[in-house]
Image (cartoon, rainbow, N blue to C red):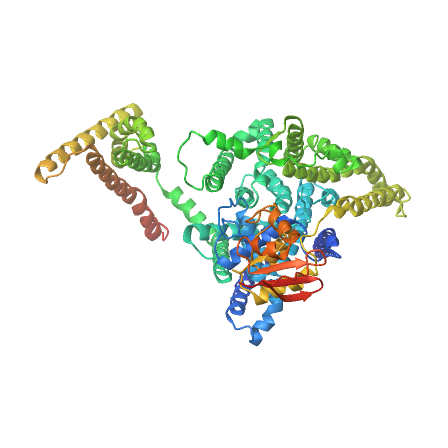
Amino acid sequence: MKLKDKVIALAFISAIIASIVLVTAEVTEPSQSFDQLTAFWRIPLGLYLILFPTGFLFYSFLFPYKKTVIDIEGFGLSIALSISTISLSILIANMLLRFPITLEHNLIIITALNVIFYALFIFREKIVPHLTSFWVNYCSSLKPRFSWSKFIDIVFFSNIIVFLLLLADVIVKYGEEFDQILSFLSIPLLAFFILFPTGYLIVSLLFSRKKELYSTKLLLLTISLSVASFFISLVLVFISSFLIPFQFSLIIVLALLMLFNILIYILFLFVERIIPLIYFVFFRREK
Amino acid sequence: MNSMKLLRTEFWIILILFFVWLSLEMTYSIHDDYHLPYHSDEWDHIAIASEITRTDQLVNYNPYSRTGWDPQWEQNYHIFMATIMNVTDWDVVDLGGVYTALFIPVLMTFLMIFFSFLLARYLTNSTACGIIAAITVLLTRPNANILGYWFSVPMAYGMAFIPLILYVFAKAFSSKGYGYFIVLLVLLAQGTLVHPASVTIFFPAFAIYFLLSPKLLWQNKKKILLIVVEFIALISLLVGYSVFQYSFTGYSDLYQTLMQTISFTTSLYEVQAYYFLPRFITWPIFLLGMLGVASLFLSKKKEARILPLLALTLIAGVYLFFTEGRIFLSDYRRVFMYAAMLTSLLSGIGIYAIASFFLNPLKKRLKNYFIFTKKFPIVAVPQAIAVVLIAWFLFLQITFIPFTHVNMLYKVIEEEDVPAILWLKHNTSIDEVVLAMPYHSRGIYGIAGNLILYANMARLRGPRGENEPREFWAVSCEQRAKLLYGNPKYIYCVGPYQCPLDCKFLKEVYAKDSRYIYEIKR
């Protein structure tokens, strides 16, 4: 174990011990000897806890490449980060989770921060180098990918956002806030939804092994497949509305199309990412 | 090699201890004969932090009346105070809030000195310059009117963190990694929630800094975008919370409300003194500061421009206020104090610039002389004289300038009031109302926690008008009984002018050192 790692571990352990001592002093009766003993030590111990270790652990996580244990800059930034992260966390915990501002709750927050920062430091220092080398080996073992599918994640998640906005347009009543904005946006969003994502996902899945393809051809194919999928969904929903009685609406067609897109995306993830990774982990590395 | 390393470590430890001593000396010397916080604002912050520890929740009302709405622009400062009160449990010696308010100024002064050292050292690549700037930054004159590092107020937090934000900003945009940038985001978020005025002042300087280096702007577009998003989110949260209380109904008055929020006119602060910066920090320090501005602008290090840019934009803001009667993003008192602080810091860089201009050639000659002759270098004498002169100049300045306004400090309560207020703490309930003069009322709430009726206007004000208690003590006993507004249970007064009170409806429960407490018979 390097000196730097030892000092960081020491800061973490001392913070945990300080928290335990402070919380024990708080819950014991004032007449007990333990409380009298800690009454004096509580001031330096408490000040140390809120002014140093949390920031030091955060600083160590952010700057793992620094060779010295702690330099003059690290000392200053540790104090500043301790004050800032603890105050911000107490504020957020109180505003969002209604966490009371008491000693016990503050110590829970401080301890949680220390554990998180120390875990992040260990992760970055010990695990990330291994993961990086693994990832580099894995990426270099892969065959060149079909460039058309490299935006698949962005297209898929923007598709979800567009669907949610269209759904919001249906839910928001006339005259409410955002009604005008959504009405204004609904036509271009609908056009995007019908013309692009489904076809793009299908093309990415079907032709992912191909190295070269003419992009104009592919664009036409994408649009054709998208429009075709939309019409198939439209027909399916239309027929279903007769078989199972429900009111036909465009948003149900879009929901069906969205479901279809999610299935294609999961299939793509499975075929293109999970299977090669499993294959690499269990077969290629052993060779 | 190891011994060199050890020497370096020892040097840093000695330097930090020197900074600690300096901050103790500069902050506590005003408390030599008075061991309580001076300013009404300090007592108000004690009140809010005490209320947080009492209720275990954030406070968005006036604690003196425990009702109404009070926009908490400085919420994180009170959380910080309340956390210190919680973990140290100073309250076992009865004066938890007071000790916290006495501890915070020394911590903030230490951080201001330390961060100024880091900033000046980084911008000039010189530890000597860092040390000189860390001393000269103390030359701003804190006073009761525009506050400063003597007081436990959010503005002192701002003064401590401004040099650090500049330091981290300069490093974040000159390095490729995201380490310093994340630190900057955290510091800006905390700074905005502790004291918004200490962060909004950076906007113009940052904008000009990037306009002067368009290449830097393009290289760091992602980082800049993230900072803009963070600022918009924080300001929306703050304005949404403090101005609209999260009940935003329309855009019709949005522009007007925003302009009112970010612009500060003279009418708000008519009582302010119009300070003249060179006279405030003295002409030599101002001129040295301007020399520091010039030396950093001429520096090869491009990020060194950020410090003089911030100082100049703040000075321009002060000028705008003098000529147009309006200032934007932060109010005049804060902008003026920050301008004075940064000019003082820059004066350290100015001193270093003069010293290196004259001494560097001499240093080279000295080195050669010493290498060849191995004798005591006579030419070192002027250098030694120069160092002694700089040290003497700094010593004279630091022992005189910062304490010029010390006589203008006022006391909220006298130390003789403390035993009487502690009697209230130990013998009454905090829900029982105490009638006292406005200044004493603040001390009573800060130490005993009782509800009060009157407090002169500062960060907070009392629930009732300030003239009522004066009227109460001016009339006869029969009339006094009719003037008991706000349902008080106790009356606190100080002799010989106000007390003793010989009224039938009052029962004396405490009398010591001319301090009297009466219980009101119902």
- Residue that protrudes farthest toward the left in the picture: A243
Answer with the quarter of the image where residue B92 lies.
bottom right
Seen as rendered, the residue at the extreme top is A216
Q: Residue at x 13, y 32 (%)?
A: A235
The image position of residue B402, as x and y in percent, is 75, 45
Image quadrant in which you'd find residue A261: top left
Q: Nearer the viewer, residue A139 or B195?
A: B195
**In-image side of A229 versus B36 (left or right):** left
Please determine whether, in this image, residue B158 is positioned above or below residue A26.
above
Q: Residue at x 40, y 32 (%)?
A: B250
Q: Is residue B234 visible?
A: yes
Figure disc tally: 0
Q: Position of residue A72 (x, y in %)?
A: 65, 50
Q: Is residue A11 visible?
A: no
Percent x, y of residue B429: 53, 64
Quadrant containing the N terminus of chain A is bottom right
Q: Is residue A176 above or below residue A7?
A: above
Q: Nearer the viewer, residue A141 or B210?
A: B210
Indicate whether A87 appears above or below B336: below
Which sits in the foreground, A93 or B259? Answer: B259
Residue B235 is situated, as x and y percent measured from the top left of the image, at 49, 38
Left or right: B479 in relation to A136: right
Name, please, the residue furthest toward the front.
B478
